[in-house]
Image: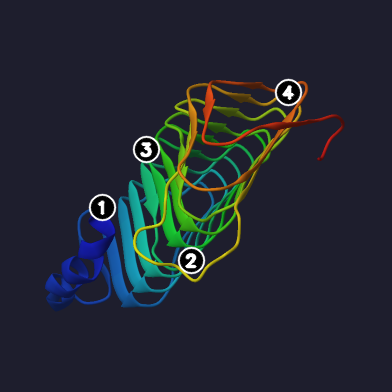
């Protein structure tokens, strides 16, 4: 997983100091990174700090270890990942590839678009009329595929490895008019709620509970 190499890669680049240490690349050990409105950047990486791309800004690969990532309205990135932190895509933001975190929530606003896979081990995943092209994968996160959202590639909730003291049962909701194409596979116990106006693929490992209205 590329996240494991972030700190090592940044340390190698230390002789070039904080800030821009190669063309189209910005990296730090400690500190946040910001890209302004409509600004264009290359790869962005930090170890201890957050990354923010303001409205209509853009970057290539965006990664941090301890910190969150936020893309403003209609901002763009090639991929986004963090270990300990949440990821927010504001209205109309787009990530061409994958979006992943280990410990943190994922929130995608109206019209947000992820071309690749969305992954989170722990943390709530929320789609608000958003699109995910490569499916959703988690171990312990609750998932809210909100009204008018679309997910291609299905949903996978994996069985935890080894022993776990976390007895929380993930809650998976597919809201009104939402579409989940592909299989919904649950390797562990979940609570699954599917709107009577939603469209989903084959479900295995759980029994869907139908609901009417906006929320179950």
- Between marks 1 and 3 in the image, the one whose residue lies nearer the viewer: 3
Q: Is residue 40 visible?
A: no
Residue, disc 1 = 24
Task: Give 167 or 39, whichever is nearer the viewer.
Answer: 167
Mark earlier in primary sequence (1, 4): 1
Q: CA distance from mark 1 to mark 3?
A: 19 Å
Q: Badge 4: how crowded within 10 Å, few (<14), some, or many (20+)?
A: some
Name the spot of residue 18 as percent of width and height, x first.
27, 75
**Which disc number belongs to residue 162?**
none
The residue sitting at 33% across, 69% down in the picture is 46
Label 3 crowding class (10 Å Cα cut-off): few <14, some 14-19, many 20+?
many
Residue 150: x %, y % from top left: 59, 27
Which sits in the foreground, 157 or 2?
A: 157
Give the residue furthest to the right.
213
| C-alpha distance separating marks 4 and 3 | 25 Å
Tell me the residue that label 3 is attached to.
97
Q: Closer to the N terminus: mark 4 or mark 2?
A: 2
The answer to whether mark 4 and mark 2 are in CB contact below 8 A is: no
Label 1: few (<14), some (14–19) or many (≥20) C-alpha neighbours in 10 Å: few
Q: Earlier in the sequence, mark 3 or mark 2?
A: 2
Does residue 182 appear anywhere in the picture? yes
The residue to which callout 2 is attached is 85
Residue 54 lies left or right of residue 40; in this view the side is: right
């Amino acid at each position: 997983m590329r996240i494991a190499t972030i700190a090592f890669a940044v340390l190698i680049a230390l002789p070039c100091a904080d800030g821009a240490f190669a063309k189209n690349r910005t990296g730090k050990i400690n500190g946040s990174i910001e890209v302004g409105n409509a600004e264009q950047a290359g790869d962005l990486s930090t170890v201890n700090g957050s990354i923010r791309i303001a409205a209509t800004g853009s970057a290539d690969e965006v990664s941090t270890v301890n910190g969150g990532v936020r893309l403003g309205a209609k901002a763009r990135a090639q991929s986004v990942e963090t270990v300990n932190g949440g990821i927010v895509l504001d209205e109309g933001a787009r990530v061409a590839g994958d979006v992943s975190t280990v410990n943190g929530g994922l929130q995608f606003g109206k019209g947000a678009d992820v071309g690749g896979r969305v992954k989170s081990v722990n943390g709530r995943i929320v789609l608000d009329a958003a699109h995910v092209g490569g499916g959703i994968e988690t171990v312990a996160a609750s998932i809210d595929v909100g009204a008018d959202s679309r997910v291609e590639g299905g949903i996978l909730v994996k069985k935890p490895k080894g022993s776990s003291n976390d007895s929380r049962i993930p809650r998976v909701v597919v809201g009104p008019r939402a579409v989940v194409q592909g299989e919904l596979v649950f390797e562990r116990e979940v609570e699954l709620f599917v709107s009577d106006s939603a469209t989903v693929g084959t479900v295995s490992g759980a029994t869907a509970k139908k609901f009417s209205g906006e929320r179950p």
